[in-house]
Image (cartoon, grey):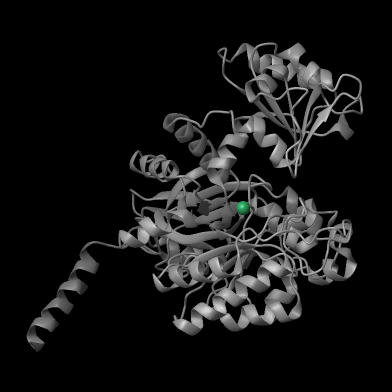
Amino acid sequence: MTLTLKAVHTLNVWRTRDQPMHADIVLLNGNFVTMNPTQPHAQAVAVKDTKLTEVGTNKQIKRWINKKTKIIDLKGKMVVPGLIDAHVHMAGFGRWLTRIDLRGAKSIKEIQKKVKKQVQETPRGKWILGRGWDQDRLAEKRYPTRWDLDKASPHHPVIINRVCGHMSVVNTEALELAGITKETLSPPGGQIDKEPKTNEPTGILRENAAMNLVWDKVPEPSEEELTDTCSLACRKAVEAGLTSVHWLVYEPIEIRVLQKLKAQGKLPLRAYIIMPVEFFGCLRDAGLSTGFGDPVTRIGSIKILVDGSLGARTAALKQPYSDDPSTRGMLICNRRELCDMVAEAHRAGFQLAVHAIGDRAIDLVLTAFERALKQMLRKGHRHRIEHASVLNKKLIQRMKKIGLIASVQPHFVISDFWVVNRVGRARAKWVYPFKTLIHEGVVSAGGSDCPVEPISPLLGIYAAVAQKSFPQERVTVDEALRMYTINAAYASFEEDAKGSIAVGKLADLTVLSDDPRKIAPNKIKDIVVEMTIVGGRTVYSRR
Ligand SMILES: [Zn+2]
């Protein structure tokens, strides 16, 4: 026995001497911020296959070079662990990208021009979709109408969404397809604008209830179209420096598309798949649960929706909205249902990702988790609350006690500039209290909620570091980076494989033009992603 062991040992030594170590890739002359406490900084790394084999100085890493090794000179640029977005609607993002971008439109004329151009490139019968206009930027200082759009598109149905997504303007063709006439009444929770004299619909539709009358007529994309749009979304994500996304899926077809992209080698990043609760029964019956998969695509959590949004005043608050005392928002599912669903998914070994924005919704979710854990204690469940927006000290302490993850989207603090009006100053102090969450020891994972917010994790980091309304809740650059690296990796049970730069971890790296720790906070938003590397493969390079 001893002899055999000795022999193996000797063999290893011999092999090492005869076949010198070599790496597939080395990255030299970098400023690596590793997020690894035992070795916080490094100058260079060596990559073999998909993993990091050494992290250290240029001198140490140069030993790994042989004639096959690809050498990347970072020229002093900063490298962080591959950035992770813990909450993104990739298919929705892809579709959003393919719509006419009207964000910069300065007049209705300009909108018409852009719509007309699209009409010329689109076969008759297909829909023309646009997004991003803002009447305050338009020279005419009014909303566009159906008649404006008819001039640009007399035959193709058109929908253009306002920048906030809470208003659509449609043309006559679209109104006709949706069957909206003078006689059509506004649905509850929505409004169909009408001309005062003639009662003709103007084409302006407010809130989902009204907008969906037309949006429901837009055909679902084919698998081929969806493949293209998801592929486009992935490209934009890696351009933004992301190496992994927690991908919120809506329909089974999206998972098929993901599988196809992966098989064709067209998936440039890793996806942790968050699925709607409607899929739960099938998954459980098939014996699947969170974590099944591989480092590229993996079954993630089960998503449950508990309330709406602050923007639409549908997030469930304990006390009425400050700017509309007639409402405290709404719960989408009832207490019993939620508790049962949470308990069942928890028992089946799933991680839950529960969308809860208002304090009333969060309170309810906490109760559901407390009960489920009482019935069946499962250590390391890592259940998450998505958004977790309107908090207070007590709620945070309960989150901490249960061991919940706050899956937060820092860019909301910039977009939701109206939050003080919505909930009043006292409550607004507890909306996205990033610093307090960190101090109380709740793991916070960073995400975008794209396409609601921009995909860029750097904009998220900027928002968390430089927010203006509540400076006491600003976090440091290191804390913000943790949200988008090691904490987001923790939120998918993958902190041993990614989220920091360390030997044995996946070679997922993001190279930045500037070091966010060394520039003024308001300059962080101007940082450019130079290169994105996933498993040692350069999936994006600016040059
Ligand atoms: Zn979302």
In x, y percent, where is residue 24? 36, 53
At 75% from the left and 59% from the top, the residue drawn is: 329
Q: Residue at x 89, y 28 (%)?
A: 142
Q: Which residue lies furthest to the bottom in this view?
A: 2
Badge count:
0
Of 280 and 153, nearer the camera is: 280
Work out which quarter of the rendered image holds the N terminus and state it.
Answer: bottom left
Occupied quadrant, residue 2: bottom left
Residue 176 picture location, percent across and down: 67, 19
Task: Report whether residue 42 is seen.
Answer: no
> To which quarter of the image does residue 394 belong?
bottom right
Residue at 79% x, 70% y is 430
**Residue 388 x %, y %:** 67, 66
- Seen in the image, is 396 located left or right of residue 506? right
Image check: 366 left or right of 168? left
Q: In this view, does 527 lie to the left or right of 199?
A: left
From the top left corner, tell me how far across and down residue 380 is, in percent.
47, 78
The quarter of the picture where the C terminus appears is top right
Residue 187 seen in the figure: yes
- Residues 121 and 486: in front is 121
- Residue at the image position 45 percent from the left and 67 percent from the top: 494
Of residues 476 and 483, the one nearer the viewer is 483
